[in-house]
């Protein structure tokens, strides 16, 4: 993950929902260009925060069975409010539909009690080794390493995971 946008998971019900937070600081590299005189979090990064939170919910639900979670589709995205340095973006996702290798969520975020963005997102999830038969053994190692890294980061984002199965 180039940008780790989820700072903290505040609520988690595996198989159902997640809530998480992103604290926007003036140190965020992308704010220098978006926009110099009016720094705000880019809309695409607000959606990416939702994607990352959804990925954590999938991982917690499936006990980190798959190494890769990617955005497959975003629908009905509505951008209502800006997120500025010093503000906290709160994201909430609820699972709507689970299928083989993909999960659809109702996703919303808010800043200071006002909706920032809302949408429906579908995330694809899989192991790299399952996608490339010719490199299966090599990619299985990559999958295991990624899952170990994800478990470690999850323990920092959701400290409750250290004291329970989730």
Image (spheres, helix red, strand yellow):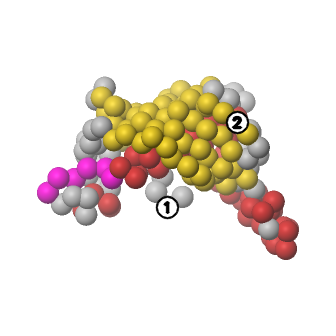
Answer left or right for 47 relative to 147.
left
Q: Give the camera-side residue of 154 and 92.
A: 92
Q: What residue range appears in magenta?
A: 37-42
* Residue 88 seen: no
Query: Which label was assigned to residue 40?
Result: none
**Where is residue 34 drawn, in percent x and y?**
26, 58
Quadrant of the rendered image containing residue 143: bottom right
Say whether residue 155 is magenta: no
Compared with residue 96, is residue 68 higher up or lower down, i.e. above or below?
below
Quadrant of the rendered image containing residue 115: top left
Which residue, given by chain and number where applicable, does mark 2 sit on? 98
Which residue, given by chain and number where applicable, does mark 1 sit on? 2
Marks 2 and 1, the one that precedes in the sequence: 1
Q: Are marks 2 and 1 in contact (CB under 8 Å)?
A: no
Q: Residues within 10 Å of mark 2 (few under 14, many from 20)?
A: some
* Residue 85 seen: yes
Magenta stretch prevailing secondary structure: loop
**Where is residue 105 drawn, in percent x and y?**
57, 35
**SS for callout 1:** loop
């Amino acid at each position: 993950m180039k940008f780790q946008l989820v700072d903290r998971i505040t609520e988690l019900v595996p198989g159902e929902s997640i809530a998480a937070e992103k604290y926007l600081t003036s140190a965020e590299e992308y704010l220098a260009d978006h926009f110099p005189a009016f720094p705000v979090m880019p809309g695409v990064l607000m959606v990416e925060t939702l994607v990352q939170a959804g990925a954590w919910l999938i991982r917690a639900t499936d006990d980190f069975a798959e190494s890769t979670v990617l955005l497959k589709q975003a629908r009905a995205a509505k951008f209502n409010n800006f997120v500025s340095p010093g503000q906290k973006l709160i994201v909430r996702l609820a699972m709507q539909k689970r299928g083989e290798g993909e999960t659809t969520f109702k996703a919303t975020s808010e800043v200071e009690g006002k909706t920032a963005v809302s949408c429906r997102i579908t995330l694809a999830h899989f192991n790299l080794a399952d996608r490339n038969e010719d490199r299966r053994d090599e990619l299985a190692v990559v999958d295991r390493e990624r899952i170990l890294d994800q478990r470690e980061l999850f323990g920092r984002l959701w400290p409750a995971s250290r004291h329970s199965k989730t």
